Image: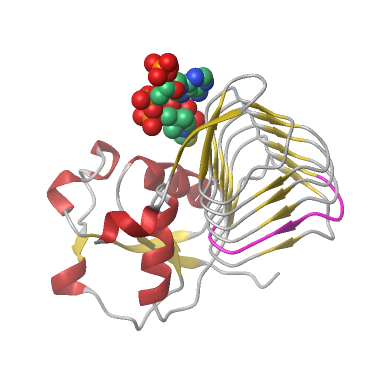
Amino acid sequence: MEEINTVRLYGAGGHAQIIHSVLKQNRVAVTEIFDDNPSGCHPKFKHISILEIDKDFSQEGDPFIIAIGDNFQRSEIAKFLQSEFATAIHSSAIIDPDIKIGKGTVVYAGAVIQPNTTIGKHVIINTLASVDHDNVIEDFVHISPNTTLCGLVHVGEGSHIGAGAVVVPKIKIGKWCIIGAGTVVIRDIPDYAVVVGNPGKIIKMNYPEESKK
Ligand SMILES: CC(=O)SCCNC(=O)CCNC(=O)[C@H](O)C(C)(C)COP(=O)(O)OP(=O)(O)OC[C@H]1O[C@@H](n2cnc3c(N)ncnc32)[C@H](O)[C@@H]1OP(=O)(O)O
């Protein structure tokens, strides 16, 4: 993977502070941070000048990481940004060396990613998440802290796997699903489903496109 020494962040909230911390440990300088509401930025950034997307933004410059936890918002911003994207990978993450990780993806402390897994673009692999062998994690997914994805799991675009969830082997989770914290997924999940409990059951549907209207 090519070495990047300078990065810009798009978003200055709670998620951005973790990415900022990972980059600092990796000795990657954050040259600019943009937000649509600089006054509402995370307290961590109160001594940093946050730039306004409407006023100060230019497509030209260092590669970006979209530092926004909401999967749908991240996907919308990725459509608009024409710059290169960088990755941020914590040094304590254990990642099989042959794994392909897409641009814009972040991997946090203690995460484990096993062989023959593919990680898409703008994905979040959060603290202590375990992503086992032969998984396919599509673009804009968030795998929350302490989640266990067993072998041969497929997670569709934009889905959010909540903290501490367990997904048993060979399960296919559709796109834009939400798997609740602590859920145990034992059956395939259709697109847009919100699933909670053990065993996981669908309680409603999640259509993020509709929130745009
Ligand atoms: C570093 C970080 O912080 S990363 C962020 C990680 N974030 C997460 O893990 C959050 C995951 N989100 C959840 O678990 C949420 O509870 C969701 C998305 C599943 C549901 O949230 P909402 O849509 O607001 O649903 P709501 O809270 O109204 O709950 C609906 C019903 O499901 C139940 N429910 C909600 N979440 C869960 C859950 N995780 N496990 C079991 N039952 C649940 C509620 O008790 C409620 O049941 P009732 O109708 O019998 O009272």
Residue at (18%, 73%) from the top-left corner?
A: 56
Locate ligand 1 by image quadrant. top left
Residue at (38%, 52%) from the top-left corner?
A: 68
Q: Which residue is more in the foreground, 23 or 193?
A: 193
Q: Which residue is more in the foreground, 18 or 170?
A: 170
Locate residue 69, reporting x and y percent. 41, 47
- Magenta-drawn segment: 114-122
Quarter of the view holding residue 138: bottom right
State whether residue 154 is above or below residue 85.
above
State whether residue 46 is above or below residue 86.
above
State how many labels appear: 0
Residue at (42%, 69%) from the top-left corner?
A: 78
State whether residue 79 is above or below residue 10.
below
Quarter of the view holding residue 4: bottom right
Locate residue 41, reporting x and y percent. 22, 45
Residue 203 vs residue 173: left or right? left
Q: Residue 171 lies in magenta, yes or no?
A: no
Q: Which residue is more in the foreground, 144 or 15?
A: 144
Locate residue 120, reporting x and y percent. 64, 62
Q: Main secondary structure of the magenta part?
A: loop
Q: Quadrant of the N terminus?
A: bottom right
Q: Quadrant of the C terminus?
A: bottom left
